Amino acid sequence: MKDKFLALIASIIPADHSLSGEAQAHLDDLTKPQGSLGRLEEVALRFVLATASLSPVIKRKMICCFAGDHGVAREGVSAFPSEVTPQMVYNMLSGGAAINVFARHAGVELVVADMGVNHEFADHPGLVKRKIASGTSNIAEGPAMSEDQAIQAMMAGAELAFTAHSEGHHLLGTGEMGIANTTPATALYSVLLGIPVDEITGRGTGIDEERLRHKKEVIRRAVAVNAVRCTTPLGTLAALGGYEIAGIAGFILGAAACRVPVVVDGFISSAGAVAAMKLCPSVADYLFFSHLSNEQGHRSVMESLGARPILDLDLRLGEGTGAALAMQMIEAAVKMYNEMATFSSASVSQKEGE
Amino acid sequence: MKDKFLALIASIIPADHSLSGEAQAHLDDLTKPQGSLGRLEEVALRFVLATASLSPVIKRKMICCFAGDHGVAREGVSAFPSEVTPQMVYNMLSGGAAINVFARHAGVELVVADMGVNHEFADHPGLVKRKIASGTSNIAEGPAMSEDQAIQAMMAGAELAFTAHSEGHHLLGTGEMGIANTTPATALYSVLLGIPVDEITGRGTGIDEERLRHKKEVIRRAVAVNAVRCTTPLGTLAALGGYEIAGIAGFILGAAACRVPVVVDGFISSAGAVAAMKLCPSVADYLFFSHLSNEQGHRSVMESLGARPILDLDLRLGEGTGAALAMQMIEAAVKMYNEMATFSSASVSQKEGE
């Protein structure tokens, strides 16, 4: 398994920057003042370079929502009980969760992946079962999982991306569901990006001041108790992550290997993205950060990565909701690139002096 | 005409804030942590109150792109020649402009209204002809138009909103096309909001430093030469506005009279919105500001209004492009309100202690 994982990482190459001049010239020839579509022009350009095609296409779009439970929930770090993880998976499978609404709205197909929920699900067409274990171990006491399990989860995520690619999806998105998962995500940021726990620990689903203090202490304990294991990105992901977070990291690696851009949802998904970027820096070329989460700390994380998310709507739900909404903007950008008239084709006069 | 105009303004009533408690309770019962969909929850709530319906509906959506020419273009305030106004109208009618791409993408119908272009258009299914005059007079030398003409333009805009309402459009948007129109828009802001010309004058379609200095001087001259006419919102709009800007103001007034929310595009459209708000403060309840324009000054304008636009994508194109994109977010918010499961219906456990 580890060989396959290393081969996956070795197969990822950077975006094709050699197309940059031609793509920019096309953007500049569209009937608008140069640069006037701002960040959508940047999005279109990045999409072209990532897919290495001057005729970018988005036909099918898919979001994979990775679900997992967390041993650290026992420490009382979340406002909701762990039973909500499988309940929300059922809610997604019956179409009633926010991600279902936004995915339908944006024309995005949704797959829910059980990576490590503490519940046995019956078969369901919208569910893929990739359970590594029934929840992680408590990171406040030791590692969340073994490195082998982290690789297993990443390879399962990567396989989902390969399948999506072979089915003709041109844009993928991440989502997650897992009660207590802001805790491992924060611990991962703290180690992988070197950001102080105090700065990035937030209220998750809505905890009060006292529980927030407790959560910070639990995260500091998790980082301390696992310090010896956190000498590599893989070791850190295994020690402090979650099965859904590792699934997201693998999904991103798999998509990048296929040159399929990935829209990263919010606070938790970004932790999967950071893990993937630490394992293979080139994946950054394939990522669109969808939105600036209202979860405290996401701003520090985005600044640390030099990323400016597409949307800023104070969302803090996860599931892939921000990814679904941002996909609409990315699709608009690609359509702009493909469908707008050029100055010459539309007989529109250029800027004076040009 | 003036009587009809005053009757229109008198017919506009504020949003129905009495529904606020029930609407908020519904939002809080949806399967997500309370408030976790952030600004989309605010959008849904405002939509409910504006339309005075606890069962909000968005079936048809329409953007009206108002076009007009400006006498002040003769002062050399724009990077593009005036002939681009009719050229871009033709581009829109043949489907090649950015607004066509984004409107198709967002499922929005587009109407182009000739309010005052210096060109005679043949009949075309996507064009409504409401020309008041072939461009405004030069505001650097005197008033753009008479107050009667401003009222005529506003009533034409209002009639377009009435028609859209009767055709079953539940969400309207504004757009505009008019070479040199950042100049009158800036002059209007300066007088109606009392913001210094230096602070809000920007580069429009992309002028250089020298032309920017010249543009500021032209705007200051326009404000000075018209000062005597700028004692009322109507007088100011007539003296410093444009036919497309007056059309937008009227469109907003007409929509508000029908309780139809309006998505305001960028820098120019916001000037129409400010004029409408000065004529009738209650229209604010029906407005969604779509995006923070990259045109310098829009941030000051939004801050002055206490408004936080939905998107921030560095757009500075106009046409209604930002409105079309923001409509996708508003529609997502309304669908969230309508389609999400509740905690009880989905058997999801509530937050602990609730």
Image (tube, coloured by chain):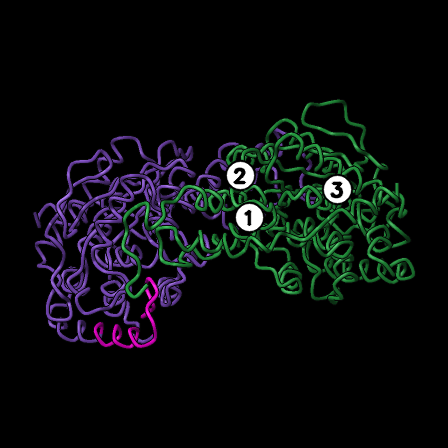
Chain colours: A purple, B green
Q: Which mark is residue B57?
A: 2
- Asked if residue B20 lies left or right of residue A54, the reply is right
Task: Please report whichever mark, 2 or 3, sits nearer to the chain's N-terminal start.
Answer: 2
Judge whether residue A312 can be spotted in this image: no
| Nearer-the-camera pick, B99 or B5 | B5
The chain holding disc 3 is B
The chain holding disc 1 is B
Q: CA distance from mark 1 to mark 3?
A: 43 Å
**Could you tell me which residue is drawn at 50 percent across and 53 percent down?**
B22
Residue at mark 2 shares a chain with residue at mark 1: yes
- Asked if residue A183 lies left or right of residue A336, the reply is left
Rendered view: A277 above or below B248: below
- Asked if residue A210 lies left or right of residue A333, the reply is left
Q: Which residue is mark 1?
A: B48
Neighbourhood count class around disc 2 (C-alpha, 10 Å): few under 14, some 14–19, many 20 upward: some
Q: Which region shows up in magenta?
A: A199-219
SS for callout 3: loop
Q: CA distance from mark 2 to mark 1?
A: 9 Å
SS for callout 2: loop
Asked if the residues shown at circle 1 and circle 3 are in contact, with their CB atoms under 8 angstroms apart, the answer is no
Neighbourhood count class around disc 3 (C-alpha, 10 Å): few under 14, some 14–19, many 20 upward: some
Q: Main secondary structure of the magenta part?
A: helix
Residue type at mark 2 is Val
**Could you tell me which residue is drawn at 69 percent across and 60 percent down?**
B209
In the rendered image, residue A220, in percent from the top left (x then y), is placed at: 22, 75
